[in-house]
Amino acid sequence: MIDHGHKSPAAVADIIAMAAVTWVAAATLHEGLGHGLACKAMGGEPIAWSTFHFECNHRAMSVWGRRIVAGAGTVVNLALIGLGGLCWRFSTAATVKLAAWIAFVVNGLTSFGYLIFSATFGIGDWNAAGVMAGVLDPWFARGVLAVVGVAGYVAIIWAAARMLSQMLNGPSMAAHARRLAITIWVTTGGVSLLAGLSADAAWQSTLGASIGVALGGNAGLLSIARFMTPSPRQCSSDVPPSWILRGTAIVCVVAFGVVLGPSVRL
């Protein structure tokens, strides 16, 4: 067993870079690949694509078409959970393994946190104007949505803790896990803040939604260290510093804010 008691899984700068790229990819694919492609496939007219919004003309769609478009963003994030889990399981490179873990946990908490968020406040993609459009008993549907969201959220935290337990070991395991979690959590909030401030219209709602999803939805990161236990199955967590990764993160964040922030008209 490798003792990582005195080692961190990666430099803070590289953790920030991985978290930033993951968060930008999650938001961009949620809107563009999810809502965007579904809009076209369901016969809608794409109008604008922004950091945390995709505007689609639904006039020619059926109720089921509108539901599919609204839920497609979350479906993409669920696919990213699976992709992150598979990469984590089968990769032997420490950098890829850590990046895959971040993709797994961030997309997982965001997806199931979004269900809880929509069920509680009646807003977001899963509200009465989106996935729940035309539902006969909206309160029952919101209750089911909340149960699914909470169950999935807890499952992601538990799975992420088990995965991270195999990457860290020794007396400093919990401290390293907390450092990793806080760094990712703050990074997603910071990127969302920049994206919200760069929006050219209704930036207040964009800012509220993005920060709510980032800091609220990803708050489960802060509890992962509590569920970690020493694991007999260990993998290397020695992630070498990467200036390529850091440079990529800067480019992604700037493009996210400068290009998608003001929205791209389609």
Image (tube, rainbow, N blue to C red):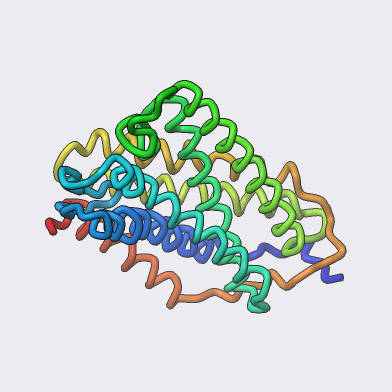
Q: Is residue 262 left or right of residue 72?
A: left
Residue 153, horizontal then vertical, whole percent: 60, 41
Looking at the image, is 76 positioned above or below residue 242? Answer: above
At a point 31% along the width and 53% down the height, the residue shown is 35
Q: Quadrant of residue 5?
A: bottom right
Picture mark count: 0
Q: Confirm whether residue 194 shows in the render.
A: no
Residue at the outermost left position: 265
Q: Is residue 6 left or right of residue 239?
A: right
Q: Is residue 266 left or right of residue 169?
A: left
At a point 29% along the width and 60% down the height, the residue shown is 37
Quadrant in which the N terminus is drawn: bottom right
Q: Confirm whether residue 143 shows in the render.
A: yes
At a point 39% along the width and 66% down the height, the residue shown is 249
Residue 95, horizontal then vertical, whole percent: 59, 73
At a point 33% along the width and 58% down the height, the residue shown is 28
Q: Quadrant of residue 176?
A: bottom right
Residue 115, horizontal then vertical, whole percent: 48, 37
Residue 252, horizontal then vertical, whole percent: 33, 65
In this orientation, which residue lies closer to the viewer: 152 or 157? 152
Q: Is residue 49 left or right of residue 164?
A: left
Quadrant in which the C terminus is drawn: bottom left
